[in-house]
Image (cartoon, helix red, strand yellow):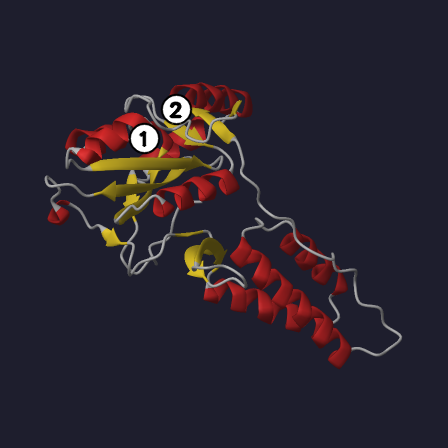
Amino acid sequence: MQRSNRTSAYRGKDATNPWLFTKKTVWMQRVSDAVKAGAAAFLQGSTRLEKVPFLVQKFSARYPTNLTSRNDLSTRKRGKTVQRWIGYYDGSDHVNWCLFVWPGEDFERSSDAWQDLKSQRVRHTGYELVRITKSGAKAPVLTWRYQKQRFEEIHDEIVQVIRQRHDARLEQIIHSLHRSPGFAGVRQQVKKLWQIVRAEWKRTRSKSEECPAIPPNIGYVRRLPDVGMLWSELMQSTTKKGANDGDDTSQTKSRKAGNPAVRVQSVSGRTPEKT
């Protein structure tokens, strides 16, 4: 697996062999980069790993995709549309991806179900990309945070396990929250959840019962290096793993079951991703 000091390993790669991120936090950071860079709209979905090059080639046939920084800028200056496709492989048989577009004079919005970034949010595994106001900041900051529903689920589970005295489960929740990706929005929410732990424990439990240890803070996400590999390398890696694990039969059954090769998320963001 390649670890690069560059922050755009996915750019400049041939559409027949795209780069795939293998660390979720890094992928989330690059998605945020694309939105910060002024992307106007996006598509989001999941695709079977073996079908990824066909999908990227399909997108690239319409508009230039994943150009190098220099070529991307020069193409936009000429009034042409450019795109960035950012894929994340999490070890399952699917790749989660986002396609971002910078419309030019040749852009046709009706050709796809584009979601406008002014009104729609990128979402993934219970997180969403939003702009929040931070103390001392001159303008809202773009960051990831838990979606409202997910935050409320965690809140309710904390209250429930404390009241039902499932202290081992509470310790697991605290540990899991401490390992959350340390984006600014997530950190704010984790601090609130830890406050809920303390308040509910004090309200529900006796003074003789000691609350499980809560970490003093959650770490910041610094600028992370790219972590991932080319599609061809990933295919070789998964093929070897499948052969060693005896997965060939189960993979064949999955194909016969008619699993969709591509799933594109709806505007509501509720279409389930394969994660």
Which residue sits at x=54%, y=55%?
184
Determine which residue is flagged by label 2: 231
Up the image or down, 169 lies above or below 262; here it is below
Up the image or down, 94 lies above or below 54; here it is below
On the image, the x and y values in percent for residue 238 come to 47, 24
C-alpha gap between disc 1 and disc 2: 8 Å
Question: Sequence order check: which comes first, mark 1 or mark 2?
Answer: 1
Q: Are marks 1 and 2 in contact (CB under 8 Å)?
A: yes
On the image, the x and y values in percent for residue 104 come to 15, 41
Which residue sits at x=30%, y=61%?
268
Q: Is residue 194 visible?
A: yes
How many residues crowd around disc 1 within 10 Å: few (fewer than 14), some, or many (20 or more)?
Answer: many
Determine which residue is flagged by label 1: 52
Which residue sits at x=69%, y=69%?
197
Q: Quadrant of the C terminus?
A: top left
Nearer the observer, 216 or 52: 216
Q: Quadrant of residue 263?
A: top left
Callout 1: helix, strand or loop? Answer: helix
On the image, the x and y values in percent for residue 96 come to 38, 41
On the image, the x and y values in percent for residue 101 come to 25, 42
Q: Quadrant of residue 214?
A: bottom right
How many residues crowd around disc 2 within 10 Å: few (fewer than 14), some, or many (20 or more)?
Answer: many
Residue 139's disc number:
none
Kind of residue indicated by mark 1: Val
Which residue sits at x=27%, y=46%?
43
Kind of residue indicated by mark 2: Trp
Q: Quadrant of residue 161?
A: bottom right
Q: Is residue 164 visible?
A: no
